[in-house]
Amino acid sequence: MTQRTVLLSTERSASRRIASTGVNPQLTAPTSRCNPGAYRVLIVEDEQDIAGLIKHTLERGGEAEAEIVGSGDAALKAVADRPPDLVILDLNLPVLSGMEVCRILRGRADAKHIPIIMLTARTTENDRVSGLELGADDYVT
């Protein structure tokens, strides 16, 4: 398997390289339908400015196709309707929290293999540990 990476740029212009090698052994090819060579990323973020920045950052190189949903229940529906290659998940969401979405996705056979990156303003060690224990593959603040 080749190493697949997603480069996320924060507003402070810092970059963080997140490798998903070995995280998703069932993933053999991108699943984007619009651009067959693009990875499909689901961004779950209720703040449209932040969601738009993440989407722009991911799509500008042409290697990813991003979809934005603004609530936890919409995220579960989007994953069921069209499973992504990666979920970027905020914790502070309406209807269902990001923690609850992560727990539900990890319990579903059709979604437990999808890498989840929690991207949030919550910086406490307790939040980070909780997110990783629920099954997030990475936790970025």
Image (tube, rainbow, N blue to C red):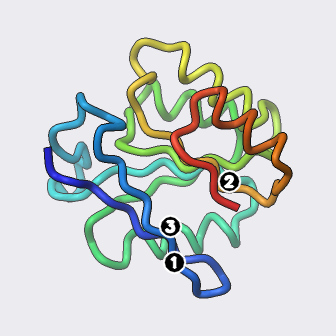
How many C-alpha atoms fall within 10 Å of the one at disc 1: few (<14), some, or many (≥20)?
few
Q: Amino acid at mark 2?
A: Glu
Q: Quadrant of residue 31?
A: top left
The vertical placement of 91 against 110, above or below, is: below
Quarter of the C terminus within the rendering: bottom right
Query: Where does residue 106 sit, x and y in percent of width and height?
Result: 54, 21
Residue receiving disc 2:
45
For disc 3, the neighbor class at 10 Å (few under 14, some 14 to 19, many from 20) is: many
The answer to whether residue 33 is seen in the rendering is yes
Q: Judge whether 38 appears above or below 109 on screen.
A: below
What is the three-letter code of the residue carrying label 1? Ser
For residue 15, the mark is 1
Q: Is residue 88 left or right of residue 94?
A: left
Q: Say which label, 2 or 3, has the lower sequence index.
A: 2
The nearer-to-camera label among 1 and 3 is 1
Q: Could you tell me how far apart the alpha carbons at marks 1 and 3 are, in whole angstroms?
A: 15 Å
Q: Do the CB atoms of the residues marked 1 and 3 lie less than 8 Å apart? A: no
Identity of the residue drawn at 45% across and 22% down: 112
Question: How far, Cα to Cα, is label 2 from label 3?
Answer: 11 Å
Sequence-first tag of 1 and 3: 1
Amino acid, disc 3: Lys
Circle 2 crowding by C-alpha within 10 Å: few under 14, some 14–19, many from 20: many
The CA distance from mark 2 to mark 1 is 19 Å
Expressed as whole percent of the image width and height from the top left, the position of residue 4 reads: 27, 55
Mark 2 vs mark 1: which is more N-terminal? 1
Residue 126, by quadrant, is top right
Q: Which residue is mark 3?
A: 55
**Left or right of 82, for residue 72:** right
Could you tell me which secondary element the residue under label 1 belongs to?
strand
Query: Residue 74 versus residue 138: which sits nearer the camera?
Result: 138
